[in-house]
Amino acid sequence: MRMLINVAESVVADALRGMAVAHPELTVDVENRVVVRRDAPVDGKVGLVSGGGSGHEPLHGGFVGPGMLSAACPGEVFTSPVPDQMVRAAAAVDSGAGVLFIVKNYTGDVLNFDMAAELAEDEGIRIAKVLVNDDVAVTDSLYTAGRRGTGATLFVEKIAGAAAEEGQPLERVEALARQVNENSRSFGVALSACSTPAKGSPTFDLPAGELELGVGIHGEPGRERRAMMTSREIADFSVNAILDDMNPRNPVLLLVNGMGATPLLELYGFNAEVQRVLTERGVAVARTLVGNYVTSLDMAGASVTLCQVDEELLRLYDAPVRTPGLRWGV
Amino acid sequence: MRMLINVAESVVADALRGMAVAHPELTVDVENRVVVRRDAPVDGKVGLVSGGGSGHEPLHGGFVGPGMLSAACPGEVFTSPVPDQMVRAAAAVDSGAGVLFIVKNYTGDVLNFDMAAELAEDEGIRIAKVLVNDDVAVTDSLYTAGRRGTGATLFVEKIAGAAAEEGQPLERVEALARQVNENSRSFGVALSACSTPAKGSPTFDLPAGELELGVGIHGEPGRERRAMMTSREIADFSVNAILDDMNPRNPVLLLVNGMGATPLLELYGFNAEVQRVLTERGVAVARTLVGNYVTSLDMAGASVTLCQVDEELLRLYDAPVRTPGLRWGV
């Protein structure tokens, strides 16, 4: 086991203790597992709460801060958080303007956020929900009915977060989040499996020299397994899989996302190939983000997310953000 | 080979093509392998040039921009860039105020930057140099006479970069860079070896269940190899190795740096342990940075860097910076 941990049981709590000391601008409740921006609730502002299994950092805790999430609820590794965390987060960030739950489409997350919404509404908090389901690789995968939620989560949280920061009302923030999800598509590739602390060994078997096309962010099976391909071939396959499913007439935001163990050197090279395909297919790229944003522990590989934007979505994307994982303009 | 590449020979050029499209705010000369901030030369401003072997991204190309480096010269993977790149970079950024070369202490880099300094001075560019040698693990390692330069490079580039941005003269920028290096110490640990594209397999043999204490950023041998330790034990060993060599009376900047393949979840947990030891040893932490900043391709592991700061160094560290790899305040 090549892990920098104490024991598997304390990995999430240890990480939260480390976040707390690294980020005094956040309130990290280690015991109850909720990460909240320190100035919450902000008067008149819609709260944004997301969460999911740990192991995808910086998602979601690293996206808490002005211009993005109000709070995040980390579950155990690759395991949904529980409703109590979500209700606690909603109560911490609600100013009376309501709270939007941003939920990646995994069965456990959906059920727990649904339950939390009911409980929070019982406490008098107005709740809206948006489901992120951008992964075109497969439907009805392990853990998921329908499409999985992956890289688009970053764009949903960023753009809805900017709208909330401006003081836009819950209905509008929710509609924007829904629009961003509908405008987004992703496709991921694994060059190696990841190892969870609890298991201590790879979660699935991917022999060296093979890759999984369309992998999920927990190592769920994709479309097919092939012998190793070049960066160029992987870019062709991934972008074409996305463009088979969307036909952007407007420019797109592009996320070239690392799964965790793939060096930034390789991600930039992959970005060159992805943008070559987009140019060939006539898709204009408005903004590019290259790095590890929606990860799968120590999995090697990458994913591509496109989000079609109009002027208003682009303006909100460009708006200032100050979180541990994404920061500009402030 | 689990690499997202085309062929080993084009890895650096491919990455530079990908940087060019992702970062329109930089001028990336793919052919000559120089990354320059687009507005260079800036009137009256000292230029800062660094560089080194590729494979440590975001260092150095990802630290080019306002408030940090003026230009970077990437060599082949784990191989020094050549003097021609450095002279070209110096010429591109010199406004007449002179240029500071920031050189990590590896024999090849030192020789090449020395030669480049002579050539640039022949062209009428005033050059100063600062050597970064913060790694307390070993002296006279593979590639190095004396101590290796590692994580402190980030602090040198950030603080000297802020001073240059303010218009401070070359002698002062050089003195600050030297002071930051002298105030800094690092120690790194590998939980796995890394694989270079050219070799396609691990550069050294580190069996699962063992770790290398004091490893270099190219996988050079450290102090000793041991059976796997906990995050708590590794933090004790690393911080104590540093504090055996420095005795900070002022607060420190803390960098908890990932080597590449260690998940952010684990790095935050490690940060909690590092800060526990620092508290026990009476060292105050002024600022904390947790993430992958000075990497070793896909090596698993982490390093700790401390930099003792007075009010002026802290002010310069906090000053705005806008680069692909480090960004705040703008």
Image (cartoon, coloured by chain):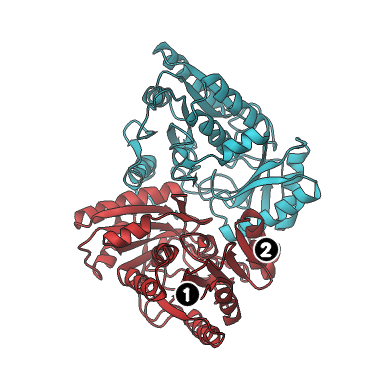
Chain colours: A cyan, B red
Residue A160 pos. (x, y %): 55, 31
Q: Can see residue B250?
A: yes
User: In this view of the protein, which residue sits in the foreground, A194 or A88?
Assistant: A88
User: In this view of the protein, which residue sits in the foreground, B207 or A303?
Assistant: A303
Check disc 1 and report its element: helix, strand or loop: loop
A293 over B182 or under it: above or below: above
User: In this view of the protein, which residue sits in the foreground, B44 or B7?
Assistant: B44
Q: Is residue A238 left or right of residue B315?
A: right
Q: Is residue A211 left or right of residue A161?
A: right
Q: Which mark is residue B14?
A: 2
Q: Amino acid under label 1?
A: Ala
Q: In the rendered structure, the residue with mark 1 lies on which chain? A: B
User: In this view of the protein, which residue sits in the foreground, B104 or A313?
Assistant: A313
Q: Which mark is residue B97?
A: 1
Q: Amino acid under label 2?
A: Asp
Q: CA distance from mark 2 to mark 1?
A: 33 Å
Q: In the rendered structure, the residue with mark 2 lies on which chain? A: B
Residue B85 pos. (x, y %): 60, 77
Q: Can see residue B142?
A: no
Q: Identify the image quadrant of residue B133.
A: bottom left
Q: Residues within 10 Å of mark 1 (few under 14, many from 20)?
A: many
